[in-house]
Amino acid sequence: MENMFVLVLLGVLALVVIGCVCVVWTERGGPRWVRVVASVTLAAGELLRQSGRSRRGSVSRTGGDGD
């Protein structure tokens, strides 16, 4: 079970690294498939960023009694 978890994490890490390489390569003018991978990578990053904002916002609205 532990080995499977490590393999999944390594797979995710590989996808992130490949996506970042494609974003940099796109900036220097790469082939069409690189631009597609870069667009997907940037869109996924934006979705993660927005989900982090919404979670933080809901926690701060419901938590605590203010100052």
Image (cartoon, rainbow, N blue to C red):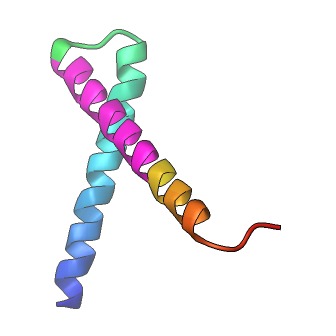
> Quadrant of residue 34 in the image?
top left
Q: Position of residue 7 (x, y in %)?
A: 21, 72
Residue 11's place in the image compared with 25, above or below, is below
**In the visual, does 36 lie left or right of 61?**
left
Q: Is residue 11 left or right of residue 49?
A: left
Magenta region: which residues?
33-51
Most extreme residue toward the right, as rendered? 67
Q: Residue at x 18, y 13 (%)?
A: 32
Camera-nearest residue between 19 and 46? 46
Magenta-highlighted stretch: main secondary structure?
Answer: helix
Number of marks present in the image shown: 0
Where is the C terminus found, in terms of image quarters? bottom right
Is 66 part of what is drawn in magenta? no
Does the magenta segment cover residue 38?
yes
Q: Nearer the viewer, residue 53 or 37?
A: 53
User: Where does the image place residue 22, in percent across and percent down from the top left?
Assistant: 32, 29
Q: Nearer the viewer, residue 60 or 12?
A: 60
Q: Quadrant of residue 64?
A: bottom right
Give the residue furthest to the top.
Answer: 29
The image shows residue 49 at horizontal and vertical percentages of 45, 44
- Residue at (40, 37) in percent of width and height: 46
The residue closer to the viewer here, 13 or 42, is 42
> In the image, residue 39 lies at what x, y percent?
28, 25
User: The N terminus appears in which quarter of the rendering?
Assistant: bottom left
In this view, 20 is above or below 32: below
Instruction: Give the left or right position of residue 57, taking residue 11 as reference.
Output: right
| Residue at (46% x, 51% y) in the render | 54
* Residue at the extreme bottom: 1
Is 39 above or below relative to 8?
above
